[in-house]
Image (spheres, coloured by chain):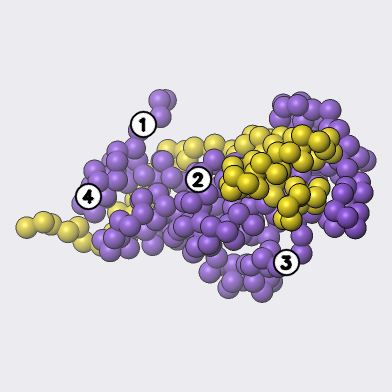
Chain colours: A purple, B yellow
Amino acid sequence: MAKETLPVDDELIPRLLAQDEAAYGQVVTAYHGLMLHLARAIVGDAIADEVVQESWLAVIRALPRFERRSSLKTWILRIVGNTAKSRLRHESRSISLDESMGHEPAIDPARFRGDGHWASPSALWHADTPEELLSSGELRAVIDAALRDLPPLQRAVIALRDMQGMEMETICKVLEVSESNGRVLLHRARSHIQAAIEEYHTL
Amino acid sequence: MSFMPSCRDISEHSSDYLDKNLPFGKRMRMRLHLFMCVNCRRYLQHMRLTIATLARFHDPEPADPATVNTIVQKLRQAAPKPTHPH
């Protein structure tokens, strides 16, 4: 089935407000997968479905008040982000979503000498492409595990940026973090995944 | 970052460097360091490869028609009364 193109917001929003069933189908088809990915990143697989359902209901109820200062997509994803975050705060063992914003360096300081030069530089990975890197199969599990280790907001940023290819500016609006905090979260997340791959290669 | 970045500085700014999010001067100083330092070149190459590999991890998983339909029905029930322009 060819992927339908979603109408522009100006066309789509009035149709959604008029409860046009075809328009509902189009937005759900277009955004459900992305919403689920974001929800999973923040709350985990078990309750992500519930969070997305709850978000859809919030979207449809709030739509008449949507002021269109962002795109519909950004606005919908922000609702998912907020629903997921409040869910997490509710159930959570982790006190803060921002545990990642501390000042400890993203890369293990033990890897550097006092003068800032590498003490233990990276060993060569013997892979130039993702295909070569993932050819062993085991590494996929290593990366999955490393992703699960990340604090929720770091996982959300890396999911939207490096897996979904969204723009940083949009991601920061969705997650309601400043652009500089967003960049710190992204760097920490990438460094953590890279370190996990590194460790796998030196075993 | 002091005038000449150390290897530690390079690693701390590697994401911003790859995302082209550094001011010109900083970028040029990093580039000079990278020109001379094989370990940092490798670190950056590995980060580039890490990012490219992560792009393979997103399951495009399109919502199946049954799921779409279930949600659409819920939305119809939950939607506020349609607004009529007149």
Q: Which residue is mark 4?
A: A14
Q: Which part of the image, by quadrant, shows the C terminus of chain B?
A: bottom left
Q: Are marks 4 and 3 in contact (CB under 8 Å)?
A: no
The residue lying at 40 percent from left, 29 percent from top is A3
For label 1, the residue is A4
Specify whether disc 1 shares its chain with disc 3: yes
For badge 1, the amino acid type reads Glu
Is mark 2 in CB contact (under 8 Å) with mark 3?
A: no
Specify whether A161 is left or right of A54.
right
Disc 2 designates what residue?
A: A167
Counting residues from the start of the chain, the first of labels 2 and 4 encountered is: 4
Depth check: A94 or A189 in front?
Answer: A189
User: The disc numbered 3 marks a residue on which chain?
Assistant: A
The residue mark sitting in front, 1 or 3, is 3
Distance from Cα at disc 2 to Cα at disc 4: 26 Å
Q: Secondary structure at mark 4?
A: helix
Query: Of circles 1 and 2, which is in front?
Result: 2
Upstream in sequence: badge 4 or badge 3: 4
**Separation of residues labelled 2 and 3 (CA atoms):** 25 Å
Mark 2 or mark 3, earlier in chain: 3
